[in-house]
Image (cartoon, rainbow, N blue to C red):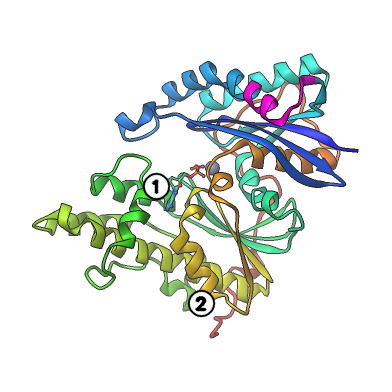
Amino acid sequence: MAEHVLGLETSCDETSAALIETRDGRPSLRSLVILSQDVHRIFGGVVPELASREHVRTLDLVVHRTLDEAGLGWSDVSAVAVTAGPGLIGALLVGVMYAKGLAMSLGRPLIGVHHHEGHLFAPGLSEPELSPPFVALLVSGGHTMLLDVPAWGDYRLLGQTLDDAAGEAFDKVGTMLGLPYPAGAAVEKLARDGRADRYTFPRPMLKDIADPAGKPYAFSFSGLKTAVLRAVQASDDPVRDRADLARGFQDAAIEVLVEKTAHATLSLGRPQTMIVGGVACNRALAERLTERLTGKARVIVAPPRLNTDNAAMIAAAGAWRLARGERSGLDLEPFDWQPLPGLQAATSTSHPLPVTS
Ligand code: KG4
Ligand code: ZN
């Protein structure tokens, strides 16, 4: 029988609701509404208090619209899945309180979902047959991590960023180039017109792949960001040089992400790799990784709408946990930080032998 899981996502500056239908454990998307808050643009970053207020103002409207688009009513909702964290605590609170009220009044189960686990379930919405094992590169505005996923719920941390997240680096470089926040997509667009040979920026921690004493899967973007800033300051016409600077930065960031992800996939012998999170919208990143792994592993990337924060991925992750019999109580509390449930350090694979292919 078909079940309909309502997902809610309010962890940052997107107010989103979605309905997914599950049949025999396979999710399919019925409707998805994402309202991106634009109030933050003038501040050059997300203002937490304003984010919470916008969620309060719009969440109910977004949920009603989601039901209308799916052609479903309240009685069709079998369960409510909501992002419990990590994220902005005030923003999360709005979604969690709404979800609790709804679950209680409908008499339906409630499930709190970890935002990162939600990102991992996004590609499965466009490819319902998708299942582990795979390597996952999670790259968003807040996080950059490389995971080995032998089975759903079994997440092995290969490495993560030691400072800035990849998306954060794109956003900050965008600010240096005079682009409005969030700047990732605009930096990618500029880079398409830029020359690859004008700026060569450092590839942070790339050499660690071949260094037995290094951190092969750790990332660092703050030095790269500083190198771009110096180049912007040294330019006699940064507006003229914008596209070349964007290209130089993007090539450096992507090379590190691609090489470390490819190395993990090949070392672990995984047949497939997924890129998830907002930075997965970057076509150059997906193309380079696909080229790099051609004939060796399949690269899976969801459509852009499912890569940036959205409630469909939360509903999908929630549906999986509900199917395992998990439920959250009405005492569910939002959290600003907690590790992914089931996350463990991949100790046996953190220093695999260098792969030469
Ligand atoms: O997953 P997401 O929507 O939110 C977080 O959980 O952080 O990711 C947003 C991030 C932003 O930093 C944004 O600039 C970046 O994803 N982003 C991109 C692109 N599209 C979005 N970065 C690079 N290239 C893109 N095309
Ligand atoms: Zn996210």
Image x and y of residue 139, in percent: 50, 53
Whether residue 165 can be seen here: no
Q: Does residue 127 show up magenta in the picture? A: no
Image x and y of residue 201, in percent: 28, 66
Residue at 52% in and 75% down: 292
Image x and y of residue 356, in percent: 53, 85
Q: Residue furthest bottom?
A: 356
Q: Could you tell me which secondary element the residue under label 1 belongs to?
A: helix
Whether residue 70 can be seen here: yes
The residue at which mark 2 appears reads as 212
Above or below 302: residue 179:
above
Residue at 54% in and 55% down: 145
Q: Residue furthest right?
A: 1
The C terminus - image quarter: bottom right
Above or below 271: residue 15:
above
Above or below 322: residue 206:
below
Q: Give the quadrant of residue 268.
A: bottom right
Residue type at the position of mark 1: Glu
Q: Does residue 70 show up magenta in the picture? A: yes
Q: Residue furthest top?
A: 105
Residue type at the position of mark 2: Pro
Cα–Cα span, label 1 and label 2: 29 Å
The N terminus - image quarter: top right
68 left or right, relative to 278: right
- Indicate if the residue with disc 1 has its beta carbon within 8 Å of ligand 1: yes
The residue at which mark 1 appears reads as 168
Q: Could you tell me which secondary element the residue under label 2 belongs to?
A: loop
Image x and y of residue 48, in percent: 43, 26
Specify the segment rendered in magenta. Answer: 64-74
Q: Residues within 10 Å of mark 2 (few under 14, many from 20)?
A: few
